[in-house]
Amino acid sequence: MLSSSNRRWQCALLAAWLVAICGAASADQTDYLPPWNPPPAGGVSFAVPPFDAIADLHGDIVDPQLTVFFAGNQFMVVHDLVEAFKQRYPQYQRIFVETLPPGILVKQIETGSLVMGNLRIAAKPDIFTNGKDSIADLQKQRGWFADTTNYARNPLAIMVAKGNPKHIEGLKDLARADVRVSMPNPQWEGIAKQIEASYRKAGGDALDHTIMDSKVQDGSTYLTRIHHRESPLRVLQGESDAAPVWSTEVYFQQQILHRPVETVAIPSDQNVTATYTAARLKAAPHEQAAKDFLAFMTSADAQAIYHKYGFQPAQP
């Protein structure tokens, strides 16, 4: 019979072994979790993914010298872009950036604030970026912007797990009953309309209806609740088999983060290429900083950063 001290020692050893095993598994699992940007330097770091990991608020929220609302699919560019802007314009060091879905950002501008959990954010943007057509529509409807500039382009692609286990060859395969699709939510994601346009090019209204209605109802198409961060994560964790996304999102996961995903290309006759536009708001609290940032977006430094992350130049 083991003594009480031996039993305690064995229990402690077993507990340590279980912690080590579970910890390793947890590390492997959480390796894929956002945020996927380097955190700001200094201060106390507190992040517990997935419970507390504020992935779409960047930089200095207190007394910023520039506030930029970026379309969410450009989250991967923000760190390098802001650092390069600070080097070019050292007078601006406190910069706040949001990379939420454009539909949410528009509502934030309209209502004057954003509520996340217990936090209320009443930041007013100096710059708002979105697709060219969306910016033009907002200007026509609301007249928010003083001036604009186009700075990048991006086609669509399909993200699948490495090895393409479901043998997906194109958009029509997303209608298959055995293919689980992660799809941007049309409620707040401009990309959803462009993906649906591609569905119709590839297979008419029937393909669009199958993926966006029938498969949503039976649960095999998942509509994102936040934005593009969800789709790569779902593919990486085996919750979805395919995700139509901007090509840069597959590029970022595969080439920059070296994640086990692959690109299924969409032919040009079925594809949609977005042009991204940055707009300076007439009500920008920091007018000169906004003008400087708008000019910076088309500079060689900014364009090199966008190229690094797989974006195409604004002009073909």
Image (spheres, rainbow, N blue to C red):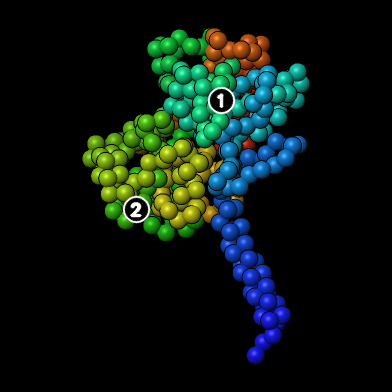
User: Looking at the image, is 241 positioned above or below residue 68?
Assistant: below
Q: Is residue 294 visible?
A: yes
Tell me the kind of residue under disc 2. Answer: Val
Viewer-side label of 2, 1: 1
Q: Residues within 10 Å of mark 1 (few under 14, many from 20)?
A: few
Displayed quadrant of residue 103:
top left
Q: Which residue is mark 1?
A: 121
Q: Quadrant of the N terminus?
A: bottom right
Query: What residue is drawn where x is 29% and y is 36%?
Result: 200
Residue 304 drawn at (x, y percent): 65, 31
Query: Of the residues shown, which amino acid type is indicated by label 1?
Result: Ile
Mark linked to residue 179:
2
Q: CA distance from mark 2 to mark 1?
A: 39 Å
> Could you tell whether 252 is left or right of 206 in the image?
right
Give percent across and percent down for residue 110: 46, 17
For the residue pair 184 and 61, the one nearer the viewer reads as 61
- Above or below 222: residue 24: below
The residue at the far front in this view is: 4
Q: Residue 208, relative to residue 1: is it above or below?
A: above
**In percent of the image, x 67 and y 39: which residue is there?**
39
Q: Choose the circle earlier in sequence order: 2 or 1.
A: 1
